[in-house]
Image (cartoon, rainbow, N blue to C red):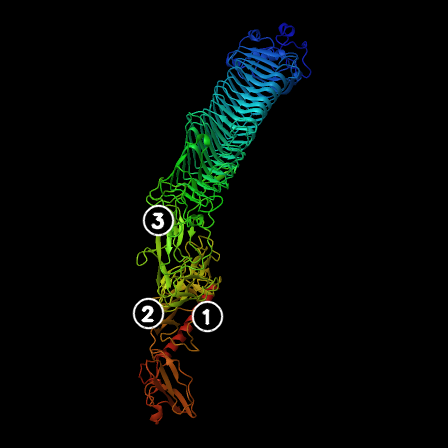
């Protein structure tokens, strides 16, 4: 043995269960020698890798001898052990010492089993037998495992491949609970898994291939997941109690699964190639979801019996027989598909509900009644689709898509369903009822191209056929709000056929649309009528608000298509039994075979019919007026359209087989045509076939209600309109619709008032739509349609002017073009202005100064308008950046950002510092000598500026200067301090002065500028001493006249006059004249040269003439005796002058002397400073 216990007489000479080869006392090859048995070592028989027993770990140590006495023969203790003999396996299973014990089969056990592994379990511990993928061959004539469990634990077989060839069955279970996980069983001649009296059987990933029965339980529950059963000659799965199948495949079985007394639950499973029955329900019923039954050779997909079935999201296909046999059970089928089958899709059921289900190509060619559905007692069909699911086998069978046969007190409800291409041989291609007693309701469903194709007198009812000839059966059929298009009958009633023999059929046909249906009449000699609907014998019909158009009846010689819409049948055997009918608010136009309206019963041929009013085209013996035609009622090219039904598409959603309940839209009543509009008075039903509310007093005939807004040209006319195919949205009679233009919508709907397709009225101009022909209220935008009329109003044409756009420098985008606008009308400014680089758009400025934003409106004046683009420059931003210039402490002031032209303020040093230095200001040059700036200085910024801190070495102080500003009557300007010698400064923010304009800074108070002493230039001049600058001012207002100063040289060379002098201005002296033998001594205010003119001090406030003064060469002023030329004044005696003073000025001499002295002092100071620095 691979793992041995300590040698004893018992375990070397005796064993229980299966007999194996004699054991050796020597350790198996590769095994470690057994340690001596002590309290600290393994117990005898324990696996080398076994863990201590939980009980041993929990209790105090006991003598080893007692433990050995408790150890059973062959038992390997522990929770996870490996066995290599069948004897050890039996002992370990039957005497499991821990719950959940895992017993691994040694690979040496693979191959043929000598006998069935037979376990009898009486303990309550669960045991797992793990084969690790081992393959076992069954013993001859026996099973692999037989497990009898009377305890409460669960026995699990896992990871084993079982070949049952030559055996009988594979796993036999009795009592308790059992699990099979990852087990494969091949070629079991009997039952692969047979559970007898087992409480619960769980199969996971179990695959059985080749067996008489796959799994069979006689009691308890069964759960199967992820498993397969293939090539089963009997039943693949047989459950006695409740069973759950998840992701199970059964392929190639006689019967797929049979249920028991509990609920059978099947999900995501597949049954393929079944011989007789895919699923058979037990008394517990079944809940089947997302499951496919594909292929039943000759039998039934699901056999319900008298039980309950819920089938959801499943597919039943390729069935030769019955897809679901409901018998007397209760069925709920939802979101399923039945397809490609020869037989019946769903049969019977005491109560059956089928929803959202597709029946496609389910055609019964095997005989018997029914194809897609054979109705039981009570059947409800909702939102389902039936396509090519009827049979033409005939042989006397009723084989439409849905068939009801016999009985009384039954109900059949079909709603919101889709029927197409269902062809039977008799009595209804889509729905056929024979001897059916009860109530039938067919509503909100779509029938197209269904038919009966037999060539006999029973080939009636292309879509729905009802045939009752029992003396005790009463059938009421309600057909409401459906669409019938292109259905056919080889005999009569291409859409509907009702026959009552010996007892009555009541047919209530309401708000349906019948279009293009055709009855062919197999035998033209039989003089019956009824192209769309035929009432035969004992039938009472009631027809309300139906639309019949484009339907045809047989073209036989005697009646020529009589009763193309509704006709009758009587026969000689029942001559006294005739149908009767009432008609109200129906439309019968455009129907028939040969001939025209002169046939007195072309549309309706029911001699016992009663006209209750509101019908259009009702004849029944009286010819219809010639002007009542399909075009007059429905407009040009009438055909069914899906006009905004509130019920949406019908049929199974997502199946590809759905349809909208279409109607043929009537046209509005224009006084000549549109006869069905507002013709029915008080409605019979509050809503039309599409679900829209009908008018309470003037409703429309037929299945559909409309509302409109009529536009009356009111003296004008339309012309040139395109040819119109009426589609239920707009209508006009022709391209010269002078009487009116209609916009059509649904009840409660709205239309947009016409802004195009407008009428014209000569030279008059359209002035809007109004509620009255004269006066009233103007209507614009959207308006609720209530069959009202709006009238065009007209006005005399207004004078037109232009609106022109001026881009005013725009350099991108598009400047709008010129518009022509009528006077006194509203004009909207163009909504997309051009663009201009570095500017923002501020609107369009009109001639009157009003600025309009894009999209604004104004009333057009009596004149042309120019709109000029307004722009605002996008501000350019500049920075003032500070550089510590060697600072070693604190924080350098942050960079400041300003818009162009804004006032910048210079920061101080803040916390910035430099060891042994004192901050003295900023300069544009790191070493000084650039433009200097001081803390708090303000100036208008015109560009980026970088300033470097200026530091004074505390050991070598330097001279700093102050620049002071004298505003001379203007606002105060702060001085600039701490200016290093030779530095420039930035111009401060200019001062202001009432009624004056600032004209710069000057060196002297009189603000004169000469070649020797030019005006102050901040970009040129440097500070080398304390200095004061003076503001110069010019008067703010400009007078109407300027002044002229004329120069009289009094014998000297000519001097040009100075013109256009602004009042209050000061002049620069002109170039002096010359005179031979004389010296020029200035300009005077009179020829006698009494009052000297001081150009630097005197303002010009009037036009005047100045006179030159001359003295002979070699004479002193004042010595001359020629008073006419020299005057009496002496320049050497002049003091501070005033206007009219006759002395020469002394102030310039004094200022010059002081300046010279200051210069000498400054030179001395600088020299001493240099000496200190050295």
Q: Which residue is mark 2?
A: 993
Q: Residues within 10 Å of mark 3 (few under 14, many from 20)?
A: some
Q: Earlier in the sequence, mark 3 or mark 1?
A: 3
Rounded to the nearest angstrom, the CA distance separating label 2 from label 3 is: 75 Å
* Label 2 CA crowd tier, 10 Å (few <14, some 14–19, many 20+): some
Q: Which residue is mark 3?
A: 786
Q: Position of residue 97 (x, y in %)?
A: 54, 12
Q: Residue 119 appears in which quarter of the rendering?
A: top right
Is residue 1110 visible in this depiction of the protein?
Answer: yes
Q: Is 63 or 1130 nearer to us in this picture?
A: 63
Give the foreground label among 2 and 3: 3
Secondary structure of residue under mark 2: loop
Q: Cβ–Cβ below 8 Å for labels 2 and 1? A: no
- Can you see residue 40? no
First-in-chain label (2 vs 1): 2
Q: Nearer the viewer, mark 3 or mark 1?
A: 3
Q: Is residue 290 above or below residue 177?
A: below
* Among the two numbered marks 2 and 3 on one chain, the one whose residue lies closer to the N terminus: 3
Determine the image quadrant of residue 118: top right
Q: Secondary structure at mark 3?
A: loop
- Residue 1020 numbered mark, or none: 1
> Residue placed farthest to the bottom in the image?
1121
Find residue 449 and report its horizontal and vertical position in percent.
Answer: 51, 39
């Amino acid at each position: 043995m691979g793992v041995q216990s300590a040698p004893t007489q018992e375990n070397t000479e005796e064993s229980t269960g299966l007999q194996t080869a004699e054991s050796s006392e020597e350790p198996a090859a590769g095994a470690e020698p057994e340690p001596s048995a002590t309290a600290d070592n393994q117990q005898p028989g324990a696996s080398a890798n076994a863990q201590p027993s939980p009980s041993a770990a929990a209790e105090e140590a006991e003598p080893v001898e007692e433990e050995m006495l408790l150890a059973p023969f062959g038992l390997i203790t522990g929770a996870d052990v490996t066995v290599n003999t069948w004897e050890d396996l039996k002992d370990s299973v039957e005497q499991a010492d821990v719950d959940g014990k895992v017993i691994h089969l040694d690979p040496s056990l693979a191959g043929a089993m000598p006998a069935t592994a037979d376990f009898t379990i009486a303990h309550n511990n669960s045991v797992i037998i793990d084969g690790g993928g081992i393959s076992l061959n069954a013993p001859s004539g026996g099973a692999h495992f037989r497990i009898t469990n009377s305890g409460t634990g669960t026995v699990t077989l896992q990871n084993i491949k079982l070949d049952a060839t030559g055996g009988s069955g594979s796993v036999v279970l009795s009592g308790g609970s059992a699990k099979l996980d990852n087990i494969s069983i091949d070629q079991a001649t009997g039952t692969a898994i047979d559970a007898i009296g087992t409480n619960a059987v769980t199969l996971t990933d179990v695959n059985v291939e080749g067996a008489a029965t796959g799994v069979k339980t006689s009691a308890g529950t069964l759960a199967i997941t992820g498993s397969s059963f293939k090539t089963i000659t009997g039943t693949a799965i047989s459950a006695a109690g409740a069973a759950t199948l998840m992701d199970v495949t059964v392929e190639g079985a006689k019967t797929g699964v049979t249920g028991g007394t509990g609920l059978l639950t099947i999900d995501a499973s597949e049954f393929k190639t079944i011989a007789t029955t895919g699923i058979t329900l037990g008394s517990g019923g079944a809940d089947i979801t997302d499951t496919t039954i594909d292929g039943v050779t000759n039998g039934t997909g699901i056999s319900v019996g008298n039980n309950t079935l819920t089938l959801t999201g499943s597919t039943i296909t390729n069935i030769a027989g019955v897809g679901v046999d409901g018998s007397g059970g209760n069925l709920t089928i939802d979101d399923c598909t039945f397809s490609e089958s020869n037989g019946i899709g769903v049969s019977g059921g005491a109560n059956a509900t089928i929803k959202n289900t597709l029946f496609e190509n389910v055609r019964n060619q095997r005989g018997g009644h029914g194809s897609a559905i054979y109705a039981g007692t009570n059947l409800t069909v909702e939102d389902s689709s039936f396509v090519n699911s009827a049979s033409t086998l005939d042989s006397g069978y009723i084989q439409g898509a849905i068939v009801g046969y016999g009985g009384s007190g039954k109900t059949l409800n079909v709603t919101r369903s889709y029927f197409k291409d269902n062809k039977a041989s008799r009595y209804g291609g889509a729905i056929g009822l024979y001897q059916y007693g009860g109530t039938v309701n067919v509503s909100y469903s779509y029938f197209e191209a269904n038919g009966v194709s037999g060539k006999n007198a029973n080939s009636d009812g292309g879509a729905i056929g009802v045939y009752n000839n029992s003396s005790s059966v009463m059938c009421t059929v309600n057909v409401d709000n459906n669409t019938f298009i292109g259905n056919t009958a080889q005999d009569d009633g291409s859409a509907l056929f009702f026959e009552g023999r010996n007892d009555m059929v009541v047919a209530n046909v309401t708000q349906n649309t019948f279009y293009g249906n055709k009855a062919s009449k197999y035998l033209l000699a039989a003089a019956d009528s009824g192209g769309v609907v035929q009432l035969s014998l004992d039938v009472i019909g009631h027809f309300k608000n139906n639309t019949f158009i484009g339907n045809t009846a047989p073209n036989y010689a005697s009646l020529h298509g009589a009763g193309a819409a509704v006709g009758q049948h009587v026969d000689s055997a029942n001559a006294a039994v005739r149908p009767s009918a009432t008609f109200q608010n129906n439309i019968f136009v455009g129907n028939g075979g040969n001939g025209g309206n002169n046939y007195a019963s072309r549309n309706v041929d029911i001699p016992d019919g009663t006209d209750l009013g509101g019908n259009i085209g009702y004849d029944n013996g009286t010819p219809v007026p010639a002007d009542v035609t399909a075009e007059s009622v429905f407009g040009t090219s009438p055909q069914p359209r899906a006009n905004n039904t509130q019920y949406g598409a019908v049929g199974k959603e997502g199946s590809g087989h759905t349809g909208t309940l279409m109607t043929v839209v009537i046209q509005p009543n224009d006084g000549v045509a549109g006869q069905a509009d507002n013709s029915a008075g008080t409605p019979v039903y509050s809503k039309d076939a599409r679900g829209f509310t009908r008018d309470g007093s003037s409703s429309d005939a037929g299945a559909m209600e409309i509302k409109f807004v009529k536009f009356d040209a009111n003296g004008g006319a339309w012309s040139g309109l395109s040819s119109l195919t009426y589609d239920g949205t707009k209508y006009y009679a022709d391209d010269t619709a002078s009487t009116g233009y209609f916009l059509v919508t649904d009840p409660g709907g709205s239309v947009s008032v016409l802004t195009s397709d407008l009428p014209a009225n000569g030279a008059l101009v359209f002035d809007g739509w109004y509620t009255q022909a004269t006066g009233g209220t103007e209507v614009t935008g959207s308006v609720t349609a209530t069959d009202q009329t709006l009238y065009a109003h007209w006005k005399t044409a207004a004078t037109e002017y232009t609106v022109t756009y001026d881009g005013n420098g725009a350099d991108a985008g598009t400047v709008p073009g010129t518009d022509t606008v009528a006077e006194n009308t509203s004009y909207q400014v163009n909504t997309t202005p051009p663009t201009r680089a570095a500017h923002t758009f501020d609107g369009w400025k009109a001639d009157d100064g009003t600025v309009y934003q894009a999209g604004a409106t104004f009333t057009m004046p009596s004149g042309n308008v120019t709109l000029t683009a307004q722009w605002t420059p996008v501000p350019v931003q500049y920075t003032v950046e500070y550089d510590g210039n060697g600072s070693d402490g604190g924080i350098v002031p942050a960079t400041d950002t300003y818009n162009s032209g804004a006032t910048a303020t210079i920061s101080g040093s803040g916390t910035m510092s430099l060891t042994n230095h004192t901050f003295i200001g900023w300069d544009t040059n790191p070493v000084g000598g650039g433009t200097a700036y001081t803390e708090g200085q303000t100036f208008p910024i015109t560009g980026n500026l970088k300033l470097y801190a200026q530091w004074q070495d505390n050991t070598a102080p330097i001279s700093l200067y102050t620049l002071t500003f004298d505003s001379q009557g203007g606002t105060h300007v702060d001085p600039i301090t701490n200016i290093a010698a030779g530095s420039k400064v930035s111009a401060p923010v200019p001062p202001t002065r009432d009624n004056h304009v600032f004209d710069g800074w000057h060196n002297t108070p009189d603000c004169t500028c000469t070649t020797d002493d030019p005006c102050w230039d901040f970009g040129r001049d440097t500070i080398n001493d304390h200095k004061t600058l003076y503001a110069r001012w010019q008067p703010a207002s400009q007078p109407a006249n300027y002044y002229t100063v004329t120069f009289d040289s009094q014998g000297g060379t000519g001097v040009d006059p100075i013109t256009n002098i602004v009042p209050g201005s000061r002049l620069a002296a002109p170039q002096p004249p010359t005179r031979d033998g004389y010296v020029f001594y200035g300009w005077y205010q009179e020829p006698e040269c009494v009052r000297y003119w001081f150009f630097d001090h005197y303002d010009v406030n009037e036009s005047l003439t100045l006179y030159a003064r001359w003295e002979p060469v070699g004479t002193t002023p004042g010595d001359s005796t020629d008073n006419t030329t020299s005057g009496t004044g002496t320049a050497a005696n002049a003091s501070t002058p005033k206007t009219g003073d006759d002395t020469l000025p002394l102030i310039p001499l004094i200022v010059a002397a002081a300046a010279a002295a200051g210069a000498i002092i400054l030179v001395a100071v600088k020299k001493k400073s240099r000496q200190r620095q050295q």
